[in-house]
Image (cartoon, coloured by chain):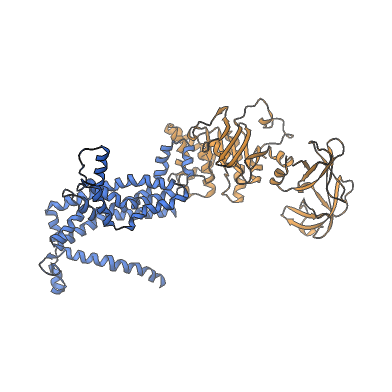
Chain colours: A orange, B blue
Amino acid sequence: MAKPSPDTSIKEFSPWTDPDEKPLIRFKNVTKRFGDFVAIDDLTLDIYTREFFALLGPSGCGKTTMMRMLAGFETVTEGTIELAGQDIAAVPPNQRAVNMMFQSYALFPHLSVYENIAFGLRRDKLPKDKIDARVTEMLKLVRLEKFARRKPHQISGGQRQRVALARSLAKGPKLLLLDEPLGALDKKLRQDTQFELMDIQETTGTTFVIVTHDQEEAMTVASRVAVMDEGRIIQVATPGGIYEGPNSVYVADFIGDVNIITGKAKAAGPDKYFVDWGGNQAPILATSERPFTDGQECHLAIRPEKISITKEKPEEAENAVQGKVLDIAYLGNLSTYHVELPGGQIIKAQTANTRRLSRRNITWEDPVWIRWNATAGVLLAE
Amino acid sequence: MRRFAMIAVPYTWLVALFLIPFLIVFKISLSDAALAIPPYAPTMKDGFTALIQGLDFENFVFLTTDDLYYKAYLSSLKIALISTVLTLLVGYPIAYSMARAPEEWRATLMMLVILPFWTSFLIRVYAWIGILSNEGLLNQLLMWLGVISEPLTILNTNIAVYIGIVYTYLPFMILPIYAALDRMDDSLIEAAEDLGCSRMSAFWLVTVPLSKNGIIAGCFLVFIPALGEFVIPSLLGGSGTLMIGKVLFEEFFNNRDWPVASAVAVILLLILIVPIVLFQRNQQKQAEAEG
């Protein structure tokens, strides 16, 4: 998470909770059609100044279309997009205070790194010394001073990515769009670059909108994440909010690993429900702020790391089920146990490998108990 | 050994079909015209020593004394240069729109560019006589439309030669430029616009520089053959059209002066070597930049 979560800091960054705050970007009932295909479906969204906003979704969900509409490369079929209170429909891309970092980087191969970064500044007819100062500043920001005279094909992929970033930031845009900015980098470099992006975003104070299909990336860098599917936004929340409080099975499933237990709800006290999920199994106790009527179908989403696994029957557990270890996925720092319940359902439980592998006491085919608290999961209607 | 064999094949080809013929032509250019078969002396029949002693640079000296030749060279250079520029002006927009055309159309458009090659070059140039002559299709159309009242004299002028060269060599200009534009990433244009370029300046600042190699290749592919062009000026040009290819033809067939004709050819080759070397360098630089 880019910013401290709400309960650790009082002066946390959350303009979306302040009703007086004016959004920098406002999508109002935006629809975009390509022929019969609806790419964006009646979408409304506010993005605030200095936010690092991630659009997350599978390919074809419309996230790139949204970004291209912000940049001005696609027109809006219905609805309006406002930038700082102004409708930008009529503003051509070259006059928007918006810059974009392209997925392919789109560096000009015939120009040096320096000239690539200076490209936008030269279009503004700035005096030579100002351009030079700004380019030098940008080169320093992305630590590429030594490569100013190289051509794009003479530097590495990671360096090219930084040139593209510097070029798109050079004009000091109000809004920077990043289209899968780290997609072409290998995993290790991607992780380093994520933190670098966050630093640069904080240093420059620019509003960033990033498009990605990599949920880890979105969770790491963003102040808020919008999960999209089929042209609609399913949920907008902080990374913590999305992970801990998904509003649908789709979001719960899309972000991270999750167990979904489907059953019928039955009231069990204030904000508490029993989930009746199988003939001879005891109902599961779960808390939910969302109300459910008796007999309503519901889905309990529990993250594997919130389920603990033991060989002995736990005492005083709110929910405990016996099962058999079907599979163990060893991830180094973590192990995920796939536990088969008597009804045939498979539940994943994850534990940190605090002991060495040779001393692990649970193995394949072992009968085990899994347990979790009533507050561990989220009860979802759909 | 296998590698040597691989290289040997093209080199044998070049030696047999280019170097040896060139040496023969060069040898003839050093001979004197004679009423004989072949129409020059000395030949191998005179014996090797006599052959060597009989060779001199007389014909090359002769070329400098008659201003017809240097005027023909200059005029050829001028015509080749102007028609190369004209071909570029016509060919670039065609290549550009081909590269911007929808994917499924491109193969058809490419086909249309290459299609004229299926007909004899000579017939296609003859067809232009029918179009450009005083009673030709163009004049009839313009008079019918009322644009002109008197037929325009186009045939047998340099204008007809330009039209002929532009028409004939257009595919050689289009194809390399198209190849360069087709390879270009569209997001570069979007990036340029995003950074504040208008459509027009994005074209000049990004598209043109990135198609530079295609433009250079196309220009050489037109300029080099146009310089020695013979058929087009003799069919479409008039008495005022002076081109070295025509002079060469006349020396060879009308005057039967093989040695002077050969000297003209050798000089033409020397003039052509300059652009060919430049062209090779450009190709090499391009390969390095991409590698």
Residue extending furthest left? B35
Judged left or right of residue B207, residue A368 is right
Residue A157 horizontal/vertical position (percent): 53, 49
Q: Is residue A267 above or below residue A315?
A: above
Judged left or right of residue A168, residue A245 is right
Residue extending furthest top? A20
Q: Quadrant of the C terminus of chain B?
A: bottom left
> Hey, which quadrant is residue B116 in on the image?
bottom left
Judged left or right of residue A65, residue B213 is left
Residue B39 horizontal/vertical position (percent): 13, 67
| Residue B274 visible in the displayed image | no
Q: Is residue A21 above or below residue A342?
A: above
Q: In this view, does A117 lie above or below B61?
A: above
Residue A54 horizontal/vertical position (percent): 63, 39
Q: In this view, does B164 lie above or below B190?
A: below
Q: Quadrant of the N terminus of chain B?
A: bottom left
| Residue A20 visible in the displayed image | yes
Q: How many labels does the image show?
A: 0
Residue at the location (14% across, 73% down)? B49
Taking depth in this image into account, of B239 and A341 the one nearest to the observer is B239
Residue extending furthest right? A315
Residue A49 horizontal/vertical position (percent): 61, 31
Judged left or right of residue A291, residue B143 is left
> Hey, which quadrant is residue B90 in on the image?
top left
Residue at the location (39% across, 69% down)? B6
